[in-house]
Image (tube, helix red, strand yellow):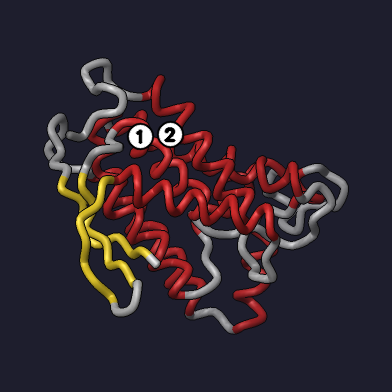
Amino acid sequence: MFLPLHDANPIRHIRFPFVNYSLIAFTTLCFLVQAVLPQAAFDQATIDFGMIPIVVRDVYPQPVPWLPDWATLFTYVFLHADWLHLLSNMLFLWIFGDNIEDAMGHVKFFLFYLACGVCAALAHLAFNFDGNGPLIGASGAVAGVMGAYVLLYPHARVLVLARIVIPIPLPVPAFWMLGFWLATQLFYVLVGSDQPVAWWAHLGGFAAGIILAAGFRRREVALLGGR
């Protein structure tokens, strides 16, 4: 119902968020490589580099012999199922990631992004202990960025395309827009859904983002800011 288009929150501490844009570029490049593969090879890539709970738990052998079991806690973040999956994640990262990189600095933001991805995967594993399907996508890591944004810039204005009767662009505080997103994830976890979406990964990444952002932020970046 709400598609973010832009946020009114200029960066203040860095000249250019090159880590955020590099993550977007690299993730897109990974999908382009996937996209040119035959379907069988595409599916095999998701099995080889996606996060499969029973493989991480060493119940089932790693499909790629030279890849450690734990490595897919990182590699899964850079794979996507289709263009919509990729573009939706990269849109959120484009809008919210630059400010989080600004708030943390380049190196800390990169480590933060990876840490949120790992936490998201572990949350998915915890609630899918015997899962044998691969988890792929940047959603959990991006959810961590969104969690950090709620903690650091809840009052920043985000222009969203709200579809009530017809699509209408509306400026809303980040807290409301991201809060609605979080409520949607909780709803599907509690009610259930037939959609092939890793809801627990989203929630785990979001929670990790809130928790980690307090320690990763620069000292001069206030909590609950963005007015």
| Residue occupying image coordinates x 58% and y 54% | 76
| Residue occupying image coordinates x 73% and y 54% | 52
Rendered location of residue 227, percent (x, y):
17, 34
Say above or below: 118 vs 182.
above
Within 10 angstroms of label 1, few (less than 14), some, or many (20 or more) residues? many
Q: What element carries label 2?
A: helix
Quadrant hosting residue 104? top left
Do the CB atoms of the residues marked 2 and 1 lie less than 8 Å apart? yes
Q: Residue furthest top?
A: 219
Which amino acid lies under the numbered mark 1 shown in the image of this protein? Answer: Phe
Rendered-image quadrant of the N terminus: bottom left
Q: Is mark 1 on a helix, strand or loop?
A: helix
Q: Residue furthest front?
A: 165
Within 10 angstroms of label 2, few (less than 14), some, or many (20 or more) residues? many
| Residue occupying image coordinates x 52% and y 66% | 80
On residue 112, which mark appears? Answer: 2
From the viewer's perspective, tell me whether residue 111 is left or right of residue 20: right
For label 1, the residue is 109
